[in-house]
């Protein structure tokens, strides 16, 4: 469901399902990034200014000597703060 201010609301059957969606991603709607937060009745609905955004980066032609957790983290730190290394390496 979406309200008049452009906020989407999702209802889940379980807390595990909600957690899976919140921790998964990245999520897009109409090719636009979707920022997710848990809602509660006392939460103020306002669109805050974005100061930073996590991005998923694919790196190609990485030298084999750098192809370690530490090496990839060092390489990724050149564009920002690495959060997670994808398990599909």
Image: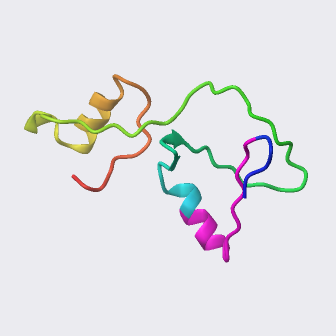
What residue lies at 74% left-to-right and 34% top-to-bottom? 47
**Percent from the top left, x then y, of residue 82?**
41, 36
Membership of 8 in magenta stretch: yes
Membership of 32 in magenta stretch: no
What residue lies at 66% left-to-right and 76% top-to-bottom? 14
Task: Give the answer, above or below, for where 42 lies relative to 63.
Answer: below
**Percent from the top left, x then y, of residue 1?**
72, 58
Q: Main secondary structure of the magenta part?
A: loop
Q: Quadrant of residue 15?
A: bottom right
What residue lies at 40% left-to-right and 46% top-to-bottom? 84
Task: Give the answer, above or below, for where 81 lies relative to 2.
Answer: above
Residue extending furthest toward the right: 42
**Percent from the top left, x then y, of residue 80?**
42, 26
Colour mapping used in the image: rainbow
Q: Quadrant of residue 73?
A: top left
Q: Which residues are magenta?
A: 6-20
Q: How many marks?
A: 0
What residue lies at 60% left-to-right and 64% top-to-bottom? 19
Q: Quadrant of residue 35?
A: top right
Q: Is residue 5 left or right of residue 86?
A: right
Q: Is residue 76 left or right of residue 16?
A: left
**Percent from the top left, x then y, of residue 64?**
9, 38
């Amino acid at each position: 469901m979406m309200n008049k201010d452009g906020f989407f609301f999702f209802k889940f059957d379980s807390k595990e399902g909600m957690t899976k969606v919140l921790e998964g991603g990245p999520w897009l709607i109409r090719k636009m990034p979707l920022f997710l937060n848990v809602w509660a009745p006392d939460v103020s609905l306002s669109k805050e200014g974005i100061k930073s955004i996590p991005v998923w980066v694919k790196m190609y032609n990485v030298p084999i000597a750098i192809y370690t957790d530490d090496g990839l983290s060092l390489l990724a730190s050149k564009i920002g703060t690495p959060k997670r290394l994808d398990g599909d390496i």
